């Protein structure tokens, strides 16, 4: 049986009909300022009401043996997010899903009046063709890709980006993304943070300050 605290960690945030919600999935091992900055960039440029950080029980493409518990990652992510429009949840664990297609399938069915958009960093666009049912994800909801240091030029030349290229809209039309039929996606420039969880974990092991802090 789950403790009351664990239930809170896994709860789906509340959303009223018509709300514009960005879904930002991640390992958050640990959460850092670039996650917050990417969320705020998407919030402002797409005129979202909220961003939900979906702390994954385990990225299906990563080795998760060293992954801290969901409870620890959510608790720390909440401290980093610290924003009235960002909700942090481990609800994928409660829903019993790990693949993003399953997550969005459940959320869009349960909340048909909520207008969801998937948010990811440019490194994930470069891997997107390896995700389960990635084409179906692009058909189910609009997507926003946030630039990431070292990925600006290469990410848009990767298999999924090329396959979806004709549905990419101009960045200056980003605020209209949620009003368009899917597939539809936008690449947002304006964030070039070198922060990564990998770098933070390495810095913690070495006892030095992470790059970008
Ligand atoms: N510096 C950054 N700039 C833009 N997007 C980022 C940045 N860091 C993380 N993201 C995005 O945030 C989401 C969650 O990322 P994640 O929790 O894996 O952090 P990470 O820093 O990429 O971790 P790791 O180094 O362990 O892969 C992903 O979509 C990722 O692309
Ligand atoms: O659905 C998939 O096949 C899939 C494959 C790789 C990553 N994802 C999702 O991508 C998000 C980013 O993961 P990460 O580990 O890069 O932070 C997170 O929500 C993962 O569940 C999803």
Image (cartoon, rainbow, N blue to C red):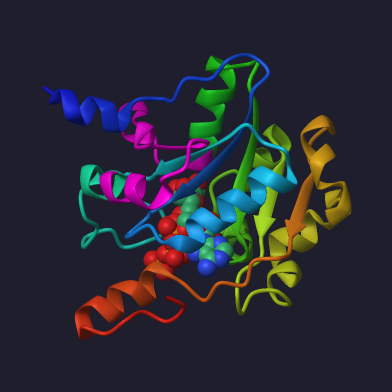
Q: How many marks?
A: 0
Identity of the residue drawn at 83% across and 55% down: 171
Q: Nearer the viewer, residue 56 or 5?
A: 5
69 part of magenta stretch: no
Q: Locate residue 102, reporting x and y percent.
A: 50, 33
Left or right: 163 as drawn, with respect to 124: right
Left or right: 189 as drawn, with respect to 171: left
Left or right: 146 as drawn, with respect to 23: right
Question: Residues in magenta?
Answer: 75-100
Q: Is residue 172 above or below residue 104?
A: below
Q: Nearer the viewer, residue 153 or 208?
A: 208
Q: Locate residue 96, reporting x and y percent.
A: 34, 30
94 part of magenta stretch: yes
Q: Locate residue 26, reporting x and y percent.
A: 44, 51
Quadrant holding the N terminus: top left
Q: Locate residue 116, reporting x and y percent.
A: 64, 31
Identity of the residue drawn at 67% across and 56% down: 145
Q: Is residue 150 above or below residue 171?
A: below
Q: Is residue 81 above or below residue 1?
A: below
Q: Nearer the viewer, residue 190 or 67?
A: 190
Q: Is residue 18 above or below residue 8?
A: above
Q: Nearer the viewer, residue 158 or 36?
A: 36
Quadrant holding the C terminus: bottom left
Identity of the residue drawn at 79% across and 36% down: 182
Q: Quadrant of residue 108?
A: top right
């Amino acid at each position: 049986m789950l403790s009351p605290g664990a239930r809170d960690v896994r709860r789906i945030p509340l959303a009223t009909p018509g709300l514009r919600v960005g879904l930002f999935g991640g390992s958050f091992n640990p959460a850092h300022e670039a996650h917050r900055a990417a969320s705020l960039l998407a919030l402002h440029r797409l005129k979202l009401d909220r961003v939900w950080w979906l702390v994954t029980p385990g990225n299906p493409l990563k080795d998760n043996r060293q992954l801290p518990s969901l409870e620890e990652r959510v608790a720390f992510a909440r401290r980093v997010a610290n924003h009235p429009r960002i909700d942090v949840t481990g609800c994928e664990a409660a829903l019993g899903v790990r693949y993003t297609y399953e997550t969005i399938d459940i959320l869009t069915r349960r909340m048909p009046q909520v207008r969801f958009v998937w948010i990811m960093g440019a490194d994930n666009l470069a891997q997107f063709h390896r995700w389960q049912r990635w084409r179906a994800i692009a058909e189910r909801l609009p997507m926003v890709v946030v630039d990431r240091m070292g990925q600006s030029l290469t990410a848009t030349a990767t298999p999924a980006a090329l396959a979806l290229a004709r549905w990419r809209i101009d960045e200056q039309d980003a605020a209209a993304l949620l009003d368009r039929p899917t597939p539809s996606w936008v690449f947002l420039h304006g964030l070039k943070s070198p922060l990564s969880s990998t770098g933070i974990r390495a810095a913690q092991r070495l006892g030095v300050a992470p790059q970008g802090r």
